[in-house]
Amino acid sequence: MIDFFNDQKNHNKEFKLSEIDSEVKKTYEKDTGSNEIYTNRTMRHWIKYGDPGLNGILERRKKGTYIFIPGKKFTKKKSPFSDQIKKKVKERDGYKCQWCKKKETTSEILAVDHVIPEDDDGKGVYENGITLCTVCNNRKRNLKTSSFGSNMFKKYLQVSIKNKDVKATKFLKDLLKVYKKHNLS
Ligand SMILES: [Zn+2]
Protein backbone atom coordinates (compact mmCIF):
# COMPACT_ATOMS: atom_id res chain seq x y z
CA MET A 1 0.00 0.00 0.00
CA ILE A 2 2.90 2.34 0.73
CA ASP A 3 4.21 1.53 -2.75
CA PHE A 4 0.96 2.76 -4.27
CA PHE A 5 1.33 6.22 -2.74
CA ASN A 6 5.08 6.43 -3.22
CA ASP A 7 4.56 5.70 -6.92
CA GLN A 8 5.10 8.98 -8.78
CA LYS A 9 2.22 8.41 -11.16
CA ASN A 10 -0.19 8.48 -8.22
CA HIS A 11 1.05 11.80 -6.83
CA ASN A 12 -1.10 14.95 -6.63
CA LYS A 13 -4.03 13.06 -8.09
CA GLU A 14 -7.45 12.69 -6.53
CA PHE A 15 -8.48 9.09 -6.07
CA LYS A 16 -11.73 7.60 -4.94
CA LEU A 17 -11.38 5.17 -2.08
CA SER A 18 -12.74 2.38 -4.30
CA GLU A 19 -10.04 3.04 -6.92
CA ILE A 20 -7.25 2.87 -4.37
CA ASP A 21 -8.79 -0.17 -2.74
CA SER A 22 -9.03 -2.20 -5.94
CA GLU A 23 -5.48 -1.28 -7.05
CA VAL A 24 -4.00 -2.12 -3.65
CA LYS A 25 -5.92 -5.37 -3.38
CA LYS A 26 -4.81 -6.46 -6.85
CA THR A 27 -1.12 -6.05 -5.99
CA TYR A 28 -1.52 -7.49 -2.52
CA GLU A 29 -3.29 -10.58 -3.83
CA LYS A 30 -0.59 -11.12 -6.44
CA ASP A 31 2.12 -10.89 -3.76
CA THR A 32 0.48 -12.82 -0.95
CA GLY A 33 -2.46 -14.76 -2.39
CA SER A 34 -4.80 -13.03 0.06
CA ASN A 35 -6.93 -9.93 -0.34
CA GLU A 36 -7.41 -9.27 3.34
CA ILE A 37 -6.01 -5.80 3.49
CA TYR A 38 -7.87 -2.95 5.14
CA THR A 39 -7.24 -0.02 2.83
CA ASN A 40 -9.76 2.34 4.37
CA ARG A 41 -8.61 1.79 7.94
CA THR A 42 -4.95 2.17 7.00
CA MET A 43 -5.57 5.41 5.14
CA ARG A 44 -7.52 6.89 8.02
CA HIS A 45 -4.58 6.06 10.23
CA TRP A 46 -2.08 7.67 7.84
CA ILE A 47 -4.13 10.85 7.62
CA LYS A 48 -4.10 11.13 11.40
CA TYR A 49 -0.63 9.82 12.23
CA GLY A 50 1.38 9.66 8.98
CA ASP A 51 3.82 6.85 8.31
CA PRO A 52 7.64 6.98 8.21
CA GLY A 53 7.60 4.94 4.97
CA LEU A 54 5.58 7.52 3.05
CA ASN A 55 7.39 10.17 0.99
CA GLY A 56 4.72 12.76 1.62
CA ILE A 57 1.33 13.23 3.21
CA LEU A 58 -2.08 11.78 2.51
CA GLU A 59 -5.09 14.11 2.63
CA ARG A 60 -8.82 13.65 2.38
CA ARG A 61 -10.24 16.12 -0.12
CA LYS A 62 -13.92 15.40 -0.54
CA LYS A 63 -16.08 12.67 0.81
CA GLY A 64 -14.32 9.43 -0.10
CA THR A 65 -11.62 11.17 -2.16
CA TYR A 66 -7.95 11.13 -1.30
CA ILE A 67 -4.84 12.84 -2.60
CA PHE A 68 -1.17 12.16 -1.95
CA ILE A 69 1.12 15.18 -1.81
CA PRO A 70 4.79 14.18 -2.14
CA GLY A 71 7.63 15.92 -0.37
CA LYS A 72 5.54 17.31 2.46
CA LYS A 73 6.40 16.18 5.95
CA PHE A 74 3.70 14.93 8.23
CA THR A 75 3.20 17.10 11.28
CA LYS A 76 1.28 15.67 14.13
CA LYS A 77 -1.70 17.72 15.24
CA LYS A 78 -1.15 18.83 18.80
CA SER A 79 -4.71 19.68 19.66
CA PRO A 80 -7.15 18.57 16.98
CA PHE A 81 -10.86 19.34 16.95
CA SER A 82 -13.21 16.50 17.78
CA ASP A 83 -15.90 15.72 15.23
CA GLN A 84 -18.49 17.08 17.63
CA ILE A 85 -16.72 20.44 17.99
CA LYS A 86 -16.17 20.65 14.23
CA LYS A 87 -19.89 20.26 13.73
CA LYS A 88 -20.68 22.99 16.28
CA VAL A 89 -18.18 25.41 14.70
CA LYS A 90 -19.60 24.78 11.23
CA GLU A 91 -23.13 25.31 12.49
CA ARG A 92 -22.11 28.62 14.03
CA ASP A 93 -20.41 29.68 10.77
CA GLY A 94 -23.46 28.68 8.71
CA TYR A 95 -21.52 25.93 6.89
CA LYS A 96 -19.65 28.62 4.96
CA CYS A 97 -15.95 29.24 4.47
CA GLN A 98 -15.33 32.34 6.57
CA TRP A 99 -12.78 33.55 4.06
CA CYS A 100 -14.36 33.11 0.60
CA LYS A 101 -17.94 32.31 1.70
CA LYS A 102 -18.06 29.04 -0.21
CA LYS A 103 -20.79 26.77 1.16
CA GLU A 104 -20.33 23.18 2.19
CA THR A 105 -21.72 20.65 -0.28
CA THR A 106 -21.82 16.87 -0.32
CA SER A 107 -18.83 16.88 -2.67
CA GLU A 108 -16.81 19.47 -0.73
CA ILE A 109 -16.45 19.19 2.98
CA LEU A 110 -15.27 22.30 4.79
CA ALA A 111 -12.39 22.21 7.26
CA VAL A 112 -12.23 23.66 10.76
CA ASP A 113 -9.03 25.58 11.41
CA HIS A 114 -7.40 26.88 14.59
CA VAL A 115 -7.70 30.65 15.12
CA ILE A 116 -4.75 30.63 17.50
CA PRO A 117 -2.40 28.18 15.73
CA GLU A 118 -1.53 24.94 17.47
CA ASP A 119 2.11 25.97 17.45
CA ASP A 120 1.14 29.00 19.54
CA ASP A 121 -0.65 26.73 21.96
CA GLY A 122 -4.08 27.17 20.35
CA LYS A 123 -6.47 24.47 21.46
CA GLY A 124 -8.99 22.35 19.59
CA VAL A 125 -11.94 23.97 21.34
CA TYR A 126 -15.13 25.56 20.01
CA GLU A 127 -14.04 29.16 20.60
CA ASN A 128 -10.78 28.59 18.75
CA GLY A 129 -12.36 27.10 15.62
CA ILE A 130 -13.17 28.72 12.30
CA THR A 131 -14.67 27.20 9.15
CA LEU A 132 -12.56 27.25 5.99
CA CYS A 133 -12.81 25.53 2.62
CA THR A 134 -9.90 23.27 1.63
CA VAL A 135 -8.61 25.82 -0.89
CA CYS A 136 -8.39 28.64 1.65
CA ASN A 137 -7.09 26.28 4.31
CA ASN A 138 -4.28 25.06 2.05
CA ARG A 139 -3.47 28.56 0.88
CA LYS A 140 -3.14 29.64 4.47
CA ARG A 141 -1.03 26.62 5.35
CA ASN A 142 1.29 26.89 2.38
CA LEU A 143 1.97 30.59 2.58
CA LYS A 144 3.65 32.54 5.28
CA THR A 145 1.20 34.40 7.47
CA SER A 146 2.30 37.75 6.06
CA SER A 147 1.58 36.73 2.47
CA PHE A 148 -1.86 35.49 3.32
CA GLY A 149 -2.75 38.93 4.54
CA SER A 150 -4.22 40.49 7.59
CA ASN A 151 -7.78 40.29 6.23
CA MET A 152 -7.93 36.70 7.33
CA PHE A 153 -7.15 37.66 10.89
CA LYS A 154 -9.59 40.54 10.80
CA LYS A 155 -12.28 37.97 10.06
CA TYR A 156 -11.00 35.75 12.83
CA LEU A 157 -11.16 38.74 15.15
CA GLN A 158 -14.81 39.35 14.28
CA VAL A 159 -15.60 35.75 15.12
CA SER A 160 -13.68 35.91 18.37
CA ILE A 161 -15.42 39.09 19.46
CA LYS A 162 -18.77 37.56 18.58
CA ASN A 163 -17.83 34.53 20.72
CA LYS A 164 -16.66 36.77 23.55
CA ASP A 165 -13.38 34.87 23.45
CA VAL A 166 -11.11 37.21 25.37
CA LYS A 167 -7.91 35.24 24.83
CA ALA A 168 -8.27 34.90 21.06
CA THR A 169 -9.43 38.51 20.73
CA LYS A 170 -6.33 39.75 22.48
CA PHE A 171 -4.09 37.45 20.45
CA LEU A 172 -5.58 38.68 17.18
CA LYS A 173 -5.49 42.34 18.15
CA ASP A 174 -1.81 41.97 18.98
CA LEU A 175 -1.20 40.16 15.72
CA LEU A 176 -2.92 42.88 13.70
CA LYS A 177 -0.84 45.51 15.50
CA VAL A 178 2.26 43.74 14.17
CA TYR A 179 0.86 43.92 10.65
CA LYS A 180 0.21 47.62 11.06
CA LYS A 181 3.62 48.29 12.52
CA HIS A 182 5.36 46.62 9.59
CA ASN A 183 2.96 48.00 7.00
CA LEU A 184 1.85 44.57 5.88
CA SER A 185 -1.52 44.14 4.28
ZN1 LIG B 1 -12.67 29.42 1.13
Image: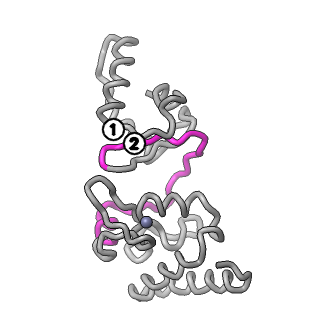
What is the CA distance from the residue labelled 2 to the residue labelled 1?
6 Å
Residue indicated by mark 1: 16
Asked whether 84 falls inside the magenta stretch, the response is: yes
Q: Position of residue 82 (x, y in %)?
A: 35, 61
Q: Which mark is residue 36?
A: none
Task: Provide the residue span drawn in magenta.
Answer: 63-89
Farthest right residue in view? 182
Which residue is labeled 2 in the image? 66
**Helix, strand or loop at disc 2?**
strand
Residue at position x 30%, y 69% from top?
Answer: 95
Quarter of the rendering occupied by the N terminus: top left
Q: Quadrant of residue 130?
A: bottom left
Q: Mark 2 and mark 1 in contact? Answer it, CB < 8 Å.
A: yes
Q: For ligand 1, tell me if the residue under mark 1 lies within 8 Å.
A: no
Q: Residue furthest left?
A: 106
The coloring applied to the image is one colour
Task: Please tell me whether residue 171 belongs to the stretch shown in magenta.
Answer: no
Residue 117 in the image: state x and y as whole percent. Answer: 54, 68
Q: Position of residue 92 (x, y in %)?
A: 31, 76
Element on which disc 1 rests: strand
Please identify the quadrant where the C terminus is shown: bottom right
Residue at 29 percent across and 53 percent down: it is 107
Which of disc 1 and disc 2 is earlier in sequence? 1
The answer to whether the beta carbon of the residue marked 2 is less than 8 Å from any atom of ligand 1 is: no
Q: Nearer the viewer, residue 64 or 167?
A: 64
Image-quarter location of ligand 1:
bottom left
Q: Is residue 183 shown above or below 149? A: below
Residue 105 quadrant: bottom left
What residue type is disc 2 on? Tyr
